[in-house]
Image: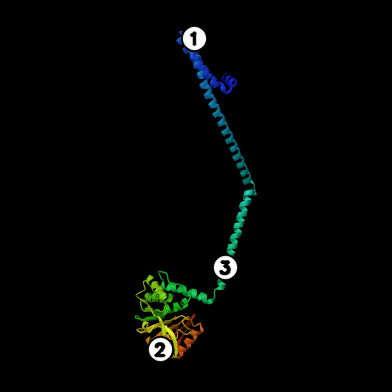
Amino acid sequence: MLRAVRTLLGSRWPVLGMLGAVVAAAVAVWALIDDGDVTQVATAALLGLALLGLVVVGTNARDAAQRARKLDSKLTKLVSATDSVAAAMKALEARQSDPSGGPLAAVIGAQRLDAAVRHDELLARYDELSSELTSTLTEEQLSELSALTNLYTMLDPDDEVPVFGGHAARPQTVLRLASLVRRLPGDGLVVECGSGSSTVWLALACRRAGRGRVVALEHHEHYAELARAALARHGLESVAEIRSAPLEPVTVGGETHDWYSGKSWADLSGVDLLFVDGPPGSVGPRSRYPAFPLLARALADGAVVALDDVNRDAEADIADDWLAEEPDGVTLADAGAVGRTRFFTAHRS
């Protein structure tokens, strides 16, 4: 009946109900003031309360209906989403049960095949590069690598050593020099014309052998400082010294060359190993020639003299000249070559 009345009155029924309740209350108050019948007053009051209750109940019912409609809409959407998920799961199960694996398996299979092909291509390229490297390295380069490995094994440096390359002596040469250091007397002296990585290796050899010391003559102050820093990193200052030796003109054998200043080497004596790796060729084509004539007096009997870069014509000519000369009664005997370095043995007559 409530729904029928609500339908009849439409959305206006709450307002009409409240208005009826107010009128009933007003009638009850009027009857009470006018000394009316108690029955009339009670009837009017009850009618007003009934109308008020009808409005409250109807309003709550309308709100509940609206909430029910919203909940029903959400449930409908949830059911639709559940149905979609169920359909997708059924489709996936159907694909998984397919012996061929279905479209998904086809995609995965294609990716695996592509990865396998790429793996094979990388392995083939690795083998190709390894083959190219082996064929590219010459016998000389392989020898230098072997010598470098021997140096690190024999001397075991515990810090950075200046790299080989550029004008530096090659590993084969330094390995032979380091081996010679092991045969030095306790107070043996190694003199090097020029400084660099070889100076550090020779100093390491002296420390490892527990004998000898190194004196290197360097005309370029920048390279002298680099060599001193390298020696300091290894704590080799007590066994190696870099002397600043600016170049000055000197006449030897009728030739004038720029060579290390006399005061940098005048006090040297008892030299057991002389390694001539400077001055560089840029100073002059025969800039290393004065080394033997000027330092012959300082060489010990049986000393070893090594001249680097004899692969160049100028140094090859210098080696031949040294063999033919006898400064201060000292002669050199050819002791063979290692790499691009030629070795000699000094004898006093």
In terms of depth relative to the viewer, which is nearer, 167 or 103?
A: 167
- Residue 180 in percent (x, y) is at 41, 80
Q: Name the residue under label 3.
A: 129
Helix, strand or loop at mark 1: helix
Q: What residue type is labelled 2?
A: His
**Spatial CA span between label 1 and label 2:** 155 Å
Colouring: rainbow
Mark 1 surroundings: few (<14), some (14-19) or many (≥20) residues within 10 A = some
- Quadrant into which the N terminus falls: top right
Task: Point out the frontmost of discs 1 and 2.
Answer: 1
- Residue 343 in percent (x, y) is at 45, 84
Helix, strand or loop at mark 2: strand
Q: Which amino acid does label 1 sit on?
A: Gln
Along the polypeptide, which appears first: circle 1 or circle 2? 1
State whether residue 1 is above or below residue 339: above
- Residue 134 in percent (x, y) is at 55, 72
Along the polypeptide, which appears first: circle 1 or circle 3? 1
Q: Which amino acid does label 3 sit on?
A: Leu
Point out which mark residue 40 bears.
1
**Spatial CA span between label 3 and label 2:** 51 Å
- Quadrant into which the C terminus falls: bottom left
- Residue 38 in percent (x, y) is at 46, 8
Along the polypeptide, which appears first: circle 3 or circle 2? 3
Discs 1, 2 touching: Cβ within 8 Å? no
In terms of depth relative to the viewer, which is nearer, 347 or 265?
A: 265
**Spatial CA span between label 1 and label 3:** 116 Å
